Image (tube, rainbow, N blue to C red):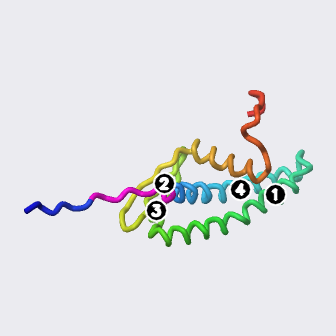
Amino acid sequence: MKPILPSPTPLQTEDEIRMVKEYLVLVVMLDLLEIEVRKLKKLRSGDLRTSRIYIRKLRGIQSGLPKQLHTLHRNFKTHGMRIIEMNRAKGYIDSRYLCRGYEYEMMLQGDTVRAEIEVKLAEEFGVDLAAEYGDDEL
């Protein structure tokens, strides 16, 4: 008679990992946009004469993020997932989450989050990041 071994922890799907990463990036992006808007409002009385346009665009992007987060929460529920804890520190984001009853951890470096946010913002602004730029424009 063979002994009954406990089953190994099931692996997460790529889609489930992507959803957690996207959630973390969107939460940071929401805060980042608020900070950017505050900075632009301070500049409004100064040198930047078109800040009102930038503020409106950033507010428009910002207003769409809660809907994306809500959709992710629905998908989390479908996959039996939930974020347990999220800690932001300088240089990284650390999170713990449940997926189908098992606990996992994800850590994203600040550079990764920044790059993901830049890609999302470039899409919103219609900027092609793949186009070649001079070194002084990066």
Residue placed at 80% from the left, 52% from the top?
40
Residue at which label 1 appears:
57
* Magenta residues, start to end: 8-17
Cα distance in 3D space between marks 3 and 2: 21 Å
Residue placed at 71% from the left, 58% from the top?
34
Give me the disc on residue 85.
3
Residue placed at 31% from the left, 59% from the top?
9
Residue 54 lies in the magenta stretch: no
Element on which disc 3 rests? strand
Residue at which label 2 appears:
14
Q: Are marks 3 and 2 in contact (CB under 8 Å)?
A: no
Of discs 3 and 2, which sits in the foreground? 2
Precedes in sequence: disc 4 or disc 2: 2
Residue placed at 77% from the left, 56% from the top?
37
Give me the disc on residue 36.
none
Name the kind of residue labelled 2 in the image.
Answer: Glu
Element on which disc 4 rests? helix
Name the kind of residue labelled 3 in the image.
Answer: Glu
Cα distance in 3D space between marks 4 and 3: 22 Å
